[in-house]
Image (cartoon, helix red, strand yellow):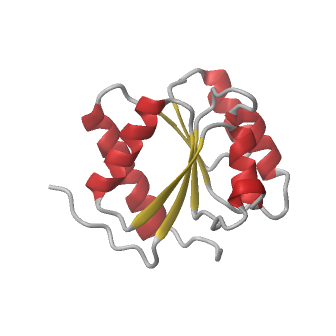
Amino acid sequence: MIQTIPPARLAEILLVDDNEDDIEFTRLAFEHVRLANRLHLATDGVEGLAFLRREGKYTGAVRPDLLLLDLNMPRMDGREMLSVMKSDEDLRRIPVVVLTTSDAELDIMRAYDKHANAYIAKPAEFSRFLEIVTRIAEHWFTLVKLPPR
């Protein structure tokens, strides 16, 4: 049985992913978990950084409490976005969970070298993905004290 997760505040989550199926899986999973959240979307690292920096069409964007980051995307991939983010004094405190299909040791090591807060390989089955999203929500929005926006 899935319970409603009561966050201290509305959870602002930025998903940076270019795969339409994975985006829909993530939306459905967060709806199912019943976490009070707004899921924002960027389809590559360039767009993700524009959102975080409130540039262009994102001038009214909120600062996310959590960033879910895929590694393999066009223009700027997740590895490069993570490097840029964690070297930016204004963005480095935003927690980043790498959520990707890769379970390659090299990708895992490089993500942590670039200061990812967690690394999770996406499962193929929705039921398993739902379990992962539930644990992400519980961890980041009930156990962890997040920095102020």
| Residue at 40%, 58% in the rendered image | 137
Q: Position of residue 7 (x, y in %)?
A: 40, 73
| Residue at 64%, 73% in the rendered image | 147
Q: Position of residue 141 (x, y in %)?
A: 45, 66
| Residue at 30%, 44% in the rendered image | 131
Q: Is residue 34 left or right of residue 86?
A: left
Q: Tell me if residue 122 can be seen.
A: no
- Up-down relation of residue 76 to residue 58 (above or below): above
Quadrant of image for the C terminus: bottom right
Within the image, what quadrant is residue 72 found in? top right
Q: Position of residue 121 (x, y in %)?
A: 48, 31
Quadrant of image for the N terminus: bottom left
Give whichever of 81, 92 is nearer the camera: 81
Q: Position of residue 16 (x, y in %)?
A: 59, 43
- Up-down relation of residue 123 to residue 39 (above or below): above
Q: Is residue 79 left or right of residue 118?
A: right
Hey, which residue is sitting farthest left in the picture?
Answer: 1
Q: Is residue 19 left or right of residue 69?
A: left
Number of numbered markers: 0
- Up-down relation of residue 67 to residue 110 (above or below): below
| Residue at 74%, 61% in the rendered image | 54
Q: Tell me if residue 106 can be seen.
A: yes
- Up-down relation of residue 8 to residue 16 (above or below): below
Hey, which residue is sitting farthest front in the picture?
Answer: 57
